[in-house]
Amino acid sequence: MDFSVIIKTMTKYGPMFLRGAGVTLLISMIGTIIGFLIGLIIGVIRTVPMPETGIKKYVLKTINAILSVYVEVFRGTPMIVQAMVIFYGSKQAFNIDMTPLFAGIFIVSINTGAYMAEIVRGGIVSIDNGQFEAAYSIGMSHLQTMINVVLPQAIRNILPAIGNEFVINIKDTSVLNVIAVTELYFQTKSVAGINYKYFETFFIASVIYLIMTFTVTR
């Protein structure tokens, strides 16, 4: 490894690395926030007490079944495959033309939402049942119980997992280069294709990724 090449590469192609890192942070941050909101909604819905009889029981069962399929599909398939199916498949099957950046944010958001749904549900389940019963006994609905009693505690408990998802998203955005999202990996590959210094160029990228993930974990 030639450190002079690293310095020259950083000096000459620094703006490309910075643009790529900016796009990576943008997608991962927005994707994590939207994914958290999706997971929050799904987590609350999947913990609604099941009515014993009536139409509400079958409606809730249907909704839970649909949400379960969503969670299992997006947790059980690689993001790179999801990216190809959503970006190219939606264009071919439904003539939906998305920009790579929008598609990247959309893919990361729904992928994160599937993982967040289970994280949030786990956080809700971890709260003592006595708090649910106490809230119901004073006339609170399930939604009021969640907003005022359960979620403030559950979110505090799952904060480390949310931060971990953010770190994972920073690294996993690299797969979006397959749909031409100009994130850090895409820009690094472009620089390496120009100067043919693959080791030094990707060494720079690895350091940038490490700085971003280390900062987030702190």
Image: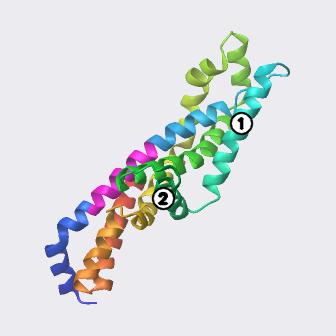
Is 199 located above or below residue 48 in the figure?
Answer: below
| Residue found at x 50% / y 37% | 37
Neighbourhood count class around disc 1 (C-alpha, 10 Å): few under 14, some 14–19, many 20 upward: some
- Toward which corner of the image does residue 186 lie, by quadrant? bottom left
Which sits earlier in the primary sequence, circle 1 or circle 2? Answer: 1
Can you say which quadrant of the picture contains the C terminus?
A: bottom left
On the image, numbered disc 1 is attached to which residue? 64
Can you say which quadrant of the picture contains the N terminus?
A: bottom left
Which three-letter amino acid code belongs to the residue tagged 2? Ile
- Toward which corner of the image does residue 134 lie, by quadrant? top right
Tell me how far mark 1 sits from mark 2, CA to CA.
27 Å
Q: Which residues are magenta?
A: 20-33
Residue 168: image tag? 2
Mark 1 secondary-structure assignment: helix
| Residue 192 visible (yes or no) | yes
Which three-letter amino acid code belongs to the residue tagged 1? Asn
Query: Which of 5/67 is in front?
Result: 67
Left-right relation of 177 to 9: right
> Residue 114: x and y, percent?
59, 47
Is 145 located above or below residue 218 in the figure?
Answer: above
